[in-house]
Image (cartoon, helix red, strand yellow):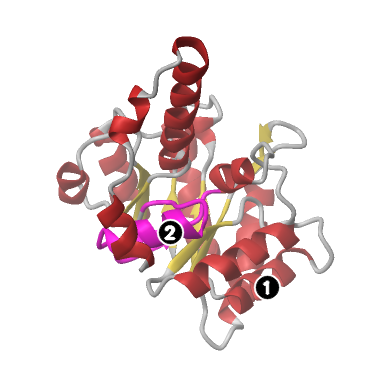
Amino acid sequence: MPNPWDVGSARLLEACGFEALATTSAGFAWSLGKLDQHVTRYELVAHVAELASAISVPLNVDSERCYPDDPGGVAETVELLAGAGAAGFSLEDYDPATESIDDLDVAATRVAAVAEATHRLPEPMVLTARAENHIRGVDDLDDTIARLTAYRDAGADAVYAPGLTDIGRIAAVVAAVGIPVNVLALPDAPTLSSLAAAGVRRVSTGSLLAAAAYGAMLAGAQELRTEGTSGYAENGVAREALREAFG
């Protein structure tokens, strides 16, 4: 389930044959000239509506903390995302305001509130609860498993601990939680076949594809500016790929 950041990247990924896509909070923020965690709820919902209407496969949404401090709180966010066409969404337990992981009780209570909100919908969305430990400098697998288990009990349909790359630790999470587990496809992560053999049900790319695209653009721009050459263009997207996705 790769993560596009705009309509063009979404349609290209769908044309590659992927059966589901997901937004990326960081990649979308960059497309607006913002840093991650600075996108408004209004901007996110508009982005979701634009992507969902442009593709024919299910769209999961990286909805960060589900905007608990916005009018109507997380319940309103759930309704807005569903109305925009999302098939699923995720909820993080990291608070950028304090730069810390939420207390477990606080995080689990928010998962329960979000789960209740989505279950009230005529067509409930898939709720993925995220434990942010391992991408926020907290390398505590026991705490991660405790969190994911609590989120499962609070009503999450799937769980996600981005940053785990050791296949043994990933398998331990899968065995402990008993519901579908998502893994982030980091450069040093196991292969998809290895993850599948360990029981992982879903793999996503987060902001990695967007970062690669932006990195290629910056490298090309730097080559042009410093060397006066355009060798970067040799690795450009094939016109046929564009015609297939956009035609």
Q: Is residue 79 magenta?
A: no
Could you say which is closer to the camera, residue 90 or residue 181?
A: 90
x, y percent for residue 114: 63, 66
* Nearer the observer, 42 or 158: 42
Is 61 rendered above or below residue 225? Answer: below
Residue under circle 2? 10
Residue 30 x %, y % = 61, 40
- Residue 121 percent across, percent down from the top left: 59, 83
Q: Residue at x 74, y 53 (%)?
A: 40
With respect to residue 39, does 70 lie above or below?
A: below
In terms of image quadrants, where is residue 91?
bottom right
Seen from this angle, which residue lies furthest right?
A: 71
Q: Is residue 102 visible?
A: no
Q: CA distance from mark 1 to mark 2?
A: 21 Å
Q: Quadrant of the C terminus?
A: bottom left
Mark 2, other Cα within 10 Å: few <14 / some 14–19 / many ≥20:
many
**On the rendered structure, is 8 left or right of 188?**
right
Please give the range of residues in magenta: 2-24
Residue at numbered disc 1: 80
Residue 73 visible in rendering: yes
Q: Amino acid at mark 1?
A: Leu
Between residue 176 and residue 110, name the one nearer to us: 110
Q: Is residue 183 above or below residue 188?
A: below
